[in-house]
Image (cartoon, rainbow, N blue to C red):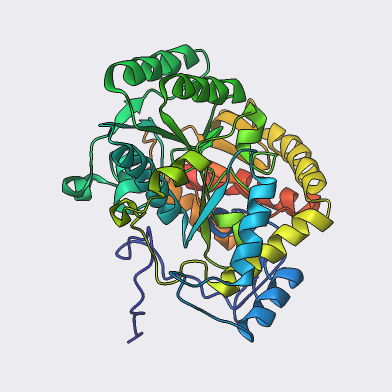
Amino acid sequence: MTRRSPVWHPFTQHAVQPDPEMIARGSGAWLETPDGRRILDAISSWWVITHGHANPRITAAIRAQAGQLDQVIFAGFTHEPAEQLATKLLSVAPAGLSHVFFSDSGSTAVEVALKMALGTWHNRGEARTTVVALEHGYHGDTTAAMSAGARGLFSQPYAPMLFDVARLPFPHEGAEQATLDALEAICTTRKAAALIVEPLILGAGGMLSYPPRVLHDMHEICARHGTLFIADEVMTGWGRTGTLFACEQAGITPDILCTAKGLTGGSLPLAATLSKPEIFDAHYSTDRARTFFHSSSYTANPICCAAALANLAVWEDEPVLDRISALGALQDEKIAQFKGDKRFTNVRRVGTMTALDLAVVDAGYLASAGPGFTKASLARGVLLRPLGNTIYVMPPYCTTSAELDMIYGTIDAAASEALAGI
């Protein structure tokens, strides 16, 4: 009898899904099993890998830091990698952000942001507690982040843990004004504490996109009403939308910005929540009760900070934005074959990301075509993991034209196989 692994995997229904693939190595856009079978990573291993697996500059920085300082408590102590990283982050982030709070994942970066926002109003003595979020949004799986995300399949079992959030209708094409009007009304009648959005494109909500002018107008409404604007750039940051941060395309600086995933090039878990001075100042006091009460044992881990510094050095020294621009143009070329194909709807691209929806009756995260598509793709040596009936491609920036041909050829074949199986 084969021994079952004791590992409980994320977003995995072990009763119906096949045993996970064992991966031994990664290089560039490729993963490799212990027996040498290669798998093309078309989704950057859950959206984190930017320059490619095992980037030599990042791995060298990790090795060097591990031999010097591996970990130190970050309350009452600091270290050079964290200090350098905070300074460099603020130099590349939208102008006007002034402070950096480190954590260890996208979820915790959002958790920190929401606590900062509510703590700011509490410390100012103002009763503003309403959090506003976009319909279909996803901000992570910790309690506050899940509260801000869409309610439904992911959150239903945990409803007693979650707090109420005011929802804005998603700004679908032709209906953008309804979103702006709803935000104006909530800010006016409820004196909202904060709005949290994924700038330009919603990730787990189905790769839904909206234009920069809508992001700009939402920010303007918040500024007019004193509502804090939180940009969740966990997925959209580090070039995914075509610019370093998506907010750049709207010409805005959020009050609070969350970043993770590509912060270390995808090599190690590290997150940061950046804030404007007013947020820090609301917590700065001789009254110790106004302290920002949040921590993680591994806050600003030196090895993770060293990896992030190496990632920033890659951005500084190499033509990363040129690679991103070229990759985006190639993505346009490759996905064009599916426009007009009756198997698909809503073919789209934002930056280096493309998406298209399988034209199936049972749409949504549990769409029956999803598992079959993943299985068929993996059999062809490509890692693709649809969001229900939404197929997306989010490759590392080193991905070549020939590798994209393999990805889109796999989409063509796997879609037919998956649709035939339902």
From the viewer's side, name the closer residue of 285 and 212.
285
From the viewer's side, name the closer residue of 133 and 415.
133
Q: Residue at x 35, y 55 (%)?
A: 291
**Count of all numbered marks drawn on residues in the image:** 0
- Residue 281: x, y in percent? 45, 44
From the viewer's side, name the closer residue of 22 and 96.
96
Q: Point out the image quarter for the C terminus.
A: top left
Q: Quadrant of residue 148?
A: top left
Q: Residue at x 66, y 30 (%)?
A: 249
Specify whether 200 is left or right of 204.
right
- Residue 151: x, y in percent? 29, 38
Residue 366: tell me if it is visible: no
- Residue 326: x, y in percent? 80, 43
Q: Residue at x 59, y 78 (%)?
A: 24
Q: Point out the image quarter for the N terminus.
A: bottom left
Residue located farthest toward the front when viewing the structure as drawn: 286
